[in-house]
Amino acid sequence: MGQLKLDDIIIEVEKKNIKNINLRVYPPHGRVRISAPRQMNQDTIHAFALSKLDWIKKQQTKLRSQVRELPKEFVDGESHYFNGNSYILKVREANVPPRIEFKQQEVILVVRPGTTADRIQIIFDEWYRAQLKKVIPELVKKWEHRMKVQVNDFGVKKMKTRWGTCNRKAKRIWLNLELAKRSPECLEYVVVHEMVHLLERNHNKHFYSLLDEFYPHWRLYKAELKNTTAI
C-alpha cells in the first residue's frame, strides 16, 4: 500500500482488481483511503485526489467535530466506535448479565433495568479492555520477533495525554484504552512505537529511523490519532 500527501492530508492508496477509483473518509478522525485499479498510474490518482480535496476536508471537519461531542448518555441512537468504525447504539433492558455486541452497523447493549450511565461506562470500558487484551499479545509477539526485543509485560489503562508508554527497565508497555475505538493499524502503530523505545529511549533521529524501518507508514496513523491525544 502506498500513500500521497496533499496539504497536511496523508492519503492511503491501495491498488486492487477493480474497474473504478473509489475514495473513502473513515471515522472517527477522517482517515482517507483511495482504492484504484491496478493499471491506473500515479499521476491520474493524484489528480483525482486533488479534485476531491475540498470534499475531503469538509468530511474530516464533520467527523472530527462529532468526536468532540458531549459525554455519552448511552441512549438509543448514539454513535460508538470500535476498531475504527462507527456503530449506532441500541439499548435493551433485561434481567440478565450485561452484554455488548457489535454487529453490522449497530452495537447492542443489554443491561438490567435502571442501570446508570456511569455503570454502563464501566461495562463498556471492561469490554474494550477485554478486546484489546485479545489482540495485543499477538502484536507484541509479532514485533518481538522482527525487532529482536523482549516485552516482559503489557497493560491497558486510560490515559489523558498519551497513547502509550514504555518502561525500558522493566520492559513493560502500557497502552491507552481508547485504542480499542481506533483502527487496528493505529493500535499496531502504537505498539510498534513503544517497542522501538526498547531500542532507543529518546525521540531522536535514531528512533525515527528505526520506526521508518519497522513501520514505514507510521506517519499516516499518527496523523489519524493526532486529533485527540498524541504520543
Image (cartoon, rainbow, N blue to C red):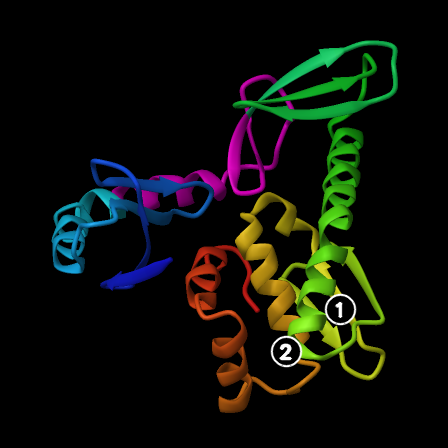
In the rendered view, tell whether residue 159 sits above or below residue 118. below
Residue 50 screen position, x and y as percent: 15, 53
Q: Quadrant of the N terminus?
A: bottom left
> Residue shown at 60%/71% (left/top)?
193
Q: Counting other residues with Cα less than 10 Å from the Cα at mark 2, is it few (<14), some (14-19), or many (20 or more)?
A: many
**Which quadrant would residue 22 be assigned to in this image?**
top left
From the image, tell me which residue sits under label 1: 173
Q: Quadrant of the C terminus?
A: bottom right
Q: Is residue 83 magenta?
A: yes
Residue 21 screen position, x and y as percent: 22, 40
In the rendered view, tell whether residue 227 sits above or below residue 130. below
Cα distance, mark 2 to mark 1? 11 Å
Q: Is residue 135 magenta?
A: no
Q: Amino acid at mark 2?
A: Val
> Residue shown at 54%/65% (left/top)?
230
Label located before the other in sequence (2 or 1): 1
Identify the mark at residue 230; answer none if there is no mark.
Answer: none
> Residue shown at 76%/29% (left/top)?
120
| Range covered by the magenta-colored residues | 58-87
Q: Secondary structure at mark 2?
A: helix
Side (left or right) of 168 relative to 28: right
**Which quadrant would residue 145 be assigned to in this image?**
bottom right
> Residue shown at 73%/35% (left/top)?
124
Residue 214 screen position, x and y as percent: 54, 74
Q: Counting other residues with Cα less than 10 Å from the Cα at mark 1, is it few (<14), some (14-19), or many (20 or more)?
A: many
From the image, tell me which residue sits under label 2: 196
In the rendered view, tell whether residue 113 sits above or below residue 199. above
